[in-house]
Image (cartoon, grey):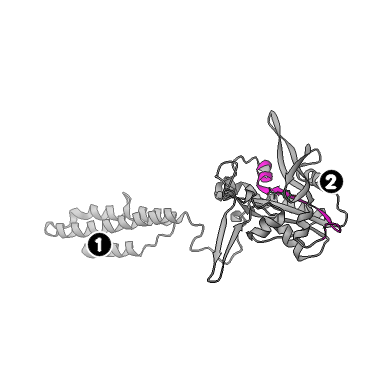
Amino acid sequence: MISDIENLKDEIKKTVITDKESLEAFRLRFLSRKGKLQSMFGNMQNVPKKDRSRVGKAMNEVKELAETKFNTQKKALQNKKKTRFKATDDLTLPVSPEYAGSLHPLTQTENEMKNIFLRLGFDVADGPEIEDDFHNFTSLNFPPDHPARDMQDTFFIRKSDKKEVQDLVMRTHTSPVQIRLMKDQPPPIRSVIPGRVYRNEAVTAKSYFQFNQMEGLYVDHKVTMGELIETLVMFARLMYGSDVKYRVRPSFFPFTEPSIEMDVWWESDSDGQWLEILGAGMVDPNVFEACGLDPETYTGYAFGMGVDRIAMLRYGINDIRILYENDIRFLDQFTG
Ligand code: DAH
């Protein structure tokens, strides 16, 4: 009898559990009412009285062994379910499209905007997110006491080594890249510049300390305001459909003169409203001078658009924070 018990112990130890099926087979073979343990307990009456306590103890040990194995393997299988791979999977196979990622809605919107401007003859440029005061403010004709330089709007960075201390900023807009382009290459320049910008603002459903813009710059001889408006209208039509309702209003920016803003009419359920999608204007002569270009020789236009606003309108998102939280349940909706 004792040797039977030892054999059963071995058998339990050697039985491999890898999945739900083998777990259930284990249970039926050893632990169920018709299983080997029950039938062994049933044999107890054949054991001579003097051996009963020794045999009973051995049997209880085997029972415990089987139960512990069953419970730990069951738990392990439940945890394993959370991983996507089985030990038998071929890990060298190409990735299953079932698990392919998706482009972030901001990336999708930015790509679409870029493609529109590529069609209109622009190229795509970029620039650094950490800027100095000259590129972010001074060269763009911001007066020294302009409120946008205030601590409330700008994240400042102090860079210091043994020799000098330099104050830098997280760029508050993509406009500094205009300056870099004009300083780096002779006109004609016709570029859009998508990128992240930063402002020291309270986080709410409508504002975030980081967002995305797309800057545009066209510099050549005899560029006109008419061309600017024509280009923006073309953009609005390609982005929102040819029946888009838009309006252009006069505005002010330090780096353009004259300056305008463009709104599109946004229809929602029963009513609608005008929503601002961009600022623009003719490059201010002071900006040309800061870049070493002669304002008598060159003219140009510039514009700046909010990518987040355009993405939110497009997908009906009413809280900007969702765009930056990377919640899989949100992102999964943008596959395909
Ligand atoms: N830089 C402006 C902002 O962040 C947007 C802007 C307005 C850009 C007019 C331009 C422009 O290039 O011409 O609000």
Work out whether 313 lies above or below 124.
above
Q: Which residue type carries mark 1? A: Ile
Quarter location, residue 174: bottom right
**Labels 2 & 1 near each other (Cβ < 8 A):** no
The percent coordinates of residue 303 (x first, y second) are: 75, 50
**Which residue sits at x=40%, y=59%?**
17
Residue that numbered label 1 is attached to: 5
| Magenta segment | 294-313
Residue that numbered label 2 is attached to: 230
Q: Nearer the viewer, residue 61 or 232?
A: 232
Q: Cα distance, mark 2 to mark 1?
A: 91 Å
- The reply to whether the magenta stretch includes residue 122 is no
**Helix, strand or loop under label 1:** helix
The percent coordinates of residue 192 (x first, y second) are: 75, 55
- The reply to whether the magenta stretch includes residue 298 is yes
**Which residue sits at x=61%, y=46%?**
333
- Check residue 192 in the rendering and tell me which mark sits there, or answer none: none
Q: Which residue type carries mark 2? A: Glu
Which residue is at the far top? 270
Screen quadrant of the N terminus:
bottom left
Q: Nearer the viewer, residue 87 or 141?
A: 141
- Point out the tag, 2 or 1, that comes first from the N-terminus: 1
Work out whether 23 lies above or below 88.
above
